[in-house]
Image (cartoon, rainbow, N blue to C red):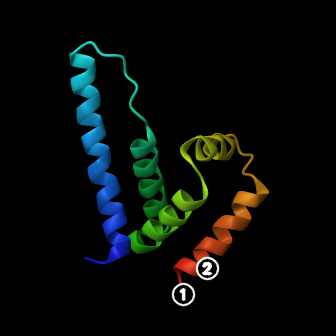
């Protein structure tokens, strides 16, 4: 399997595992302290694949670059700004460079 596609497949599998663990933790009455990162990853991949016309390799490459640059908290702040229509200029610049590198 292509290494870039493997990143996307692992992210999706991880999301399902985390969701299963969350259900078990809630059923056992445990406090939900699980990280939401897999859900964010899956949402990013879904959104990217829709907006790129299904270019899974591109999206997996972009995701890998994002994960190397930003931790969960940093990306959550960026995501909130994007949703509010205030995408940070440095993120736009980063994504432009990342996209250029991923499409070489």
Residue at the (45%, 43%) spot, across then down = 37
Relative to residue 23, is residue 69 depicted above or below?
A: below
Residue at the (36%, 17%) spot, across then down = 31
User: Marks 1 and 2, how far apart in space?
Assistant: 6 Å
- Helix, strand or loop status at disc 2: helix
Looking at the rendering, in which quadrant would you find the N terminus?
bottom left
Relative to residue 10, is residue 24 depicted above or below?
A: above
Is residue 46 found left or right of 71 in the rendered image? left
Residue 43 is marked as none
Residues packed near mark 2 inside 10 Å, few (<14), some (14 to 19) or many (20 plus)? few
Residue 43 pos. (x, y %): 44, 48
Residue at the (67%, 71%) spot, across then down = 96
Q: Disc 2 designates what residue?
A: 100
Relative to residue 37, is residue 24 depicted above or below?
A: above
The quarter of the displayed image where residue 81 is located: top right
Residue at the (60%, 59%) spot, across then down = 69
Q: Disc 1 designates what residue?
A: 104
Looking at the rendering, in which quadrant would you find the C terminus?
bottom right
Residue 39 pos. (x, y %): 40, 42
Is residue 65 found left or right of 95 in the rendered image? left
> Seen from this angle, which residue lies furthest right?
89
Residue 59 pos. (x, y %): 46, 66
Q: Are marks 1 and 2 in contact (CB under 8 Å)?
A: yes
> Seen from this angle, which residue lies furthest bottom?
104
Is residue 1 found left or right of 7 in the rendered image? left
């Amino acid at each position: 399997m292509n290494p870039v596609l493997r990143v996307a497949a692992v992210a999706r599998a991880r999301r399902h595992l985390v969701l299963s663990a969350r259900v078990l933790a809630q059923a056992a009455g445990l406090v939900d302290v699980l990280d939401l990162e897999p859900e964010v990853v899956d949402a990013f991949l879904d959104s990217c694949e829709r907006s790129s016309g299904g270019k899974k390799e591109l999206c997996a490459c972009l995701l890998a670059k994002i994960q190397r640059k930003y931790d969960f908290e940093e990306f959550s702040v960026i995501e909130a700004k994007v949703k509010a229509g205030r995408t940070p200029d440095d993120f736009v610049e980063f994504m432009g460079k990342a996209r250029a590198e991923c499409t070489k």
